[in-house]
Image (spheres, rainbow, N blue to C red):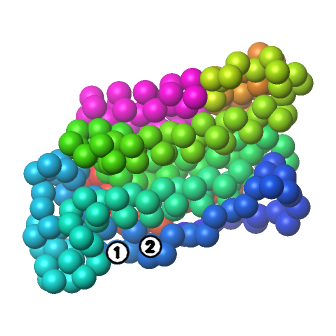
Amino acid sequence: MALIGTKLPTRAGAGGAGIRIPDPPDPDPFADPLSVALLDLIFERGYEAIDEQAIARRADTSLEEFYRRFTDRRDCTVKTMELCVRDFEWLVESSYMTGVDWQEGLRACAWAAADYVDEHRQLVWVLTVGLLQAKSEMLRVMREEWLMYGARIIERGRAAAPDPDMVPAGAALNAMGSIAQLLTHRMQKGEINSSPHEAVPQLLYLSVRPYLGEEAARQELHAPRPPGSFITRRTPRLQAA
């Protein structure tokens, strides 16, 4: 995966000296036949309706190969989701580092995340709805990791706030909760093809306001998306019909 048309800066950028861009996932979940098959099947049938044999058959591989790599369906799902989270974190951190400060970095993150949602709609459905329906508590907890990661990015704004002590303790979680609620609501209503980009300005406004105030937040309602294209790798089998 690469950031097309965007040159990452060599300076610290919005991240500061303490921010490290994670390594891309290995193996790549979007090039792994078993991971792709798993995500396809959860989207089509639901997690509880699939088994190891169905995953191996969809991946056009043997059941022996499946068990060589994974203990069972749950293990395959956990490891696939871990790789997908790492893939998302790589994109977001790379995007964040293109900003000169927190607000610009967050703006780049938001547009990159919208591109990611647009590119991987079925994966987003699996995360927001599919895993929520799974009986496994671990899988539901993994769903929350995406939300907590986004909240940690937003919370970096505390260091940029004029008065950090005045920022409510739950500001980042509240903002990320609004984002997650919007995504989940759309996916549950079957709006898998709705544009994720149209909500970016309003969600940025909600994220920036607790940290930098109303005036700075209102800039996000009219700010253009950053230059460059944050396009993730295309995986035809994971594209919505």
- Front residue of this view, candidates 148 and 71: 71
> How far is the residue under mark 1 from the one under mark 2?
6 Å
Give above or below for 222 relative to 77: above
The magenta-colored residue range is: 173-202
Residue placed under numbered mark 2 in the picture:
28
**Crowd tier of the residue under label 1, counting other residues whose Cα lies within 10 Å: few below 14, some 14–19, many 20 or above:** some
Assign the magenta stretch its main secondary structure.
Answer: helix
Asked which secondary structure carries label 2, the reply is: loop
- Front residue of this view, candidates 72 and 63: 72
Q: Which mark is residue 74?
A: none
Give above or below for 46 relative to 184: below
Residue placed under numbered mark 1 in the picture:
32
Give above or below for 18 relative to 35: above
Q: Amino acid at mark 1?
A: Asp
Q: Is residue 202 visible?
A: no
- In which quadrant of the rendered image does the N terminus lie? bottom right
Task: Judge from the rendering whether residue 82 lies leftward or rightward of residue 37; answer left or right.
Answer: right
The answer to which image quadrant residue 58 occupies is bottom left
Q: Position of residue 119 (x, y in %)?
A: 43, 54
Task: Judge from the rendering whether residue 11 lies leftward or rightward of residue 102; answer left or right.
Answer: right
Please give the name of the residue rendered at 25% of the width and 82% of the height, measured from the top-left corner: 68
Asked which secondary structure carries label 1, the reply is: loop
Q: Is residue 185 visible?
A: yes
- Label 1 close to label 2 by CB (< 8 Å): yes
**Crowd tier of the residue under label 2, counting other residues whose Cα lies within 10 Å: few below 14, some 14–19, many 20 or above:** some
- Front residue of this view, candidates 193 and 127: 127
The answer to which image quadrant residue 31 occupies is bottom left
